[in-house]
């Protein structure tokens, strides 16, 4: 039986693991199977009365869920509250979960739903325009001023401009790039059709690029 | 990438997104979350003992009640009523008065309540120790 420890959650190692996982995704490697088995084991142990099992789940997913909540709210305090609420709800519904399905998308779904409720309470618009999707990329120009920006500076600008996107666009980017979720998992977490998820992500990146180009 | 193998703007933004780091929470957030979980999140070692005691007391009270009913003649009275039901239908008030005088109602009530408590505690105890999976 594998016991999760803090050493397994080294943040620096996790970032490197994210990049590795992104490359593996393109290679269609079945990485998710390992994590799914570990989650199922923890849930089973929790339901059997193991007091440490849910604690391991909390340790495992706190950073992910906080990151998603922060990307949506842009507020550290609200993100903490929403993350805590997510685990409180998860603790109550775990007995009804199907252990053969991944746990992370379900937890993310709870977080996203709580974020939407938060936005409604705060009267924050989190809908995005429903204009027809053209699915065309902005043309890459030879004289594109962004080409002159260093990678480090571009990364910083992306981080800053990301906060100017609508909450939903920030969320899909976080799910895809920092949480390394597949489109199917994102569709489950956001409760949206697969093509809608792809469209939102495409529009998010288009809008992000527009913000970056308008700055230069 | 373009024909000259130079990364395009789209490629560079894509790479920047892949290098986007998570927003780190406060170091003690996990601890605070765990502290805020319901007390039932931690298994109660006394739940099993309490359940067993309630069951034992309940069965003991049931035995005591049955012994008292037998000593008071309640079983003979009930047997008499069932063998000659016309007594009950003709003199219902008197039949009920006779029966209620031989039943230790307080003991019966406490026995039923204790057994109900034991059953409830057993349900709680089995719920915390059994894996339930609903699709």
Image (cartoon, helix red, strand yellow):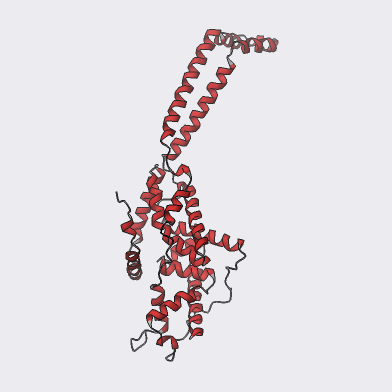
- Residue B46, by quadrant, is top left
Query: As rendered, which of B3 and B15 lies closer to the eye?
Result: B15
Q: Position of residue A49 (x, y in %)?
A: 40, 42
Q: Position of residue A164 (x, y in %)?
A: 52, 74
Residue B21 showing in the rendered view: yes
**Residue furthest out toward the bottom:** A143
Q: Is residue B120 above or below residue B9?
A: above
Residue B135 showing in the rendered view: no
**Residue furthest out toward the left:** A1
Q: Is residue A155 above or below residue A111?
A: below
Count how many numbered circles sit on residues in the image: 0
Query: As rendered, which of A5 and B64 lies closer to the eye?
Result: A5
Q: Is residue B1 above or below residue A33?
A: below
Q: Position of residue A8 (x, y in %)?
A: 32, 58
Q: Residue at x 42, y 80 (%)?
A: A154
Question: As drawn, is A107 to the left or to the right of B110?
Answer: left
Q: Residue at x 47, y 59 (%)?
A: A108
Question: As drawn, is B36 to the left or to the right of B92?
Answer: left
Q: Is residue A142 above or below residue B126?
A: below
Query: As rendered, which of A79 and B57 lies closer to the eye?
Result: A79
Image quadrant containing the N terminus of chain B: bottom left
Q: Position of residue B2 (x, y in %)?
A: 37, 87
Question: As drawn, is B47 to the left or to the right of B90?
Answer: left
């Amino acid at each position: 039986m594998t016991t999760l420890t803090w050493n397994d959650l080294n943040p620096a190692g996790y970032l490197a693991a994210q990049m590795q996982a992104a490359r593996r995704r393109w290679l269609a490697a079945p990485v998710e199977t390992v994590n799914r088995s570990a989650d199922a084991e923890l849930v089973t142990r929790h339901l059997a009365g193991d007091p440490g099992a849910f604690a391991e789940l909390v340790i495992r997913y706190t950073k992910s869920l906080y990151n998603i909540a922060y990307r949506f709210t842009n507020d550290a305090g609200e993100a903490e509250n929403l993350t805590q609420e997510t685990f409180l709800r998860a603790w109550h519904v775990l007995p009804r979960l199907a252990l053969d399905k991944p746990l992370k998308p379900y937890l993310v779904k709870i977080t996203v739903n709580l974020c939407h409720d938060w936005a409604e309470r705060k009267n924050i618009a989190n809908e995005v325009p429903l204009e027809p999707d053209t699915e065309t990329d902005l043309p890459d120009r030879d004289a594109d001023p962004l080409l002159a920006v260093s990678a480090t500076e571009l990364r910083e600008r992306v981080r800053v401009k990301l906060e100017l996107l609508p909450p939903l666009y920030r969320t899909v980017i976080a799910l895809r790039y920092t949480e390394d979720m597949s489109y199917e998992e994102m569709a489950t977490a956001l409760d949206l059709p697969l093509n809608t998820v792809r469209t939102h992500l495409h529009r998010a990146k288009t809008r992000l690029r527009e913000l970056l180009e308008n700055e230069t | 990438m373009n024909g000259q193998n130079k990364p395009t703007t789209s490629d560079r933004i894509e790479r920047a997104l892949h290098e986007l780091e998570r927003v780190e929470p406060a170091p003690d957030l996990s601890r605070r979350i765990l502290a805020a979980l319901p007390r039932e999140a931690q298994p109660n070692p006394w739940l099993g003992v309490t359940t067993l005691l309630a069951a034992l007391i309940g069965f003991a009270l049931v035995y005591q009640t049955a012994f008292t009913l037998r000593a008071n003649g309640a079983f003979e009275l009930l047997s008499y009523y069932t063998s000659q039901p016309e007594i009950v239908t003709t003199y219902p008030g008197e039949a009920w008065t006779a029966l209620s005088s031989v039943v230790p109602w307080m003991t019966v009530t406490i026995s039923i309540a204790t057994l109900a408590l034991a059953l409830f505690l057993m349900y709680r105890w089995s719920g915390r120790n059994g894996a339930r999976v609903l699709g």
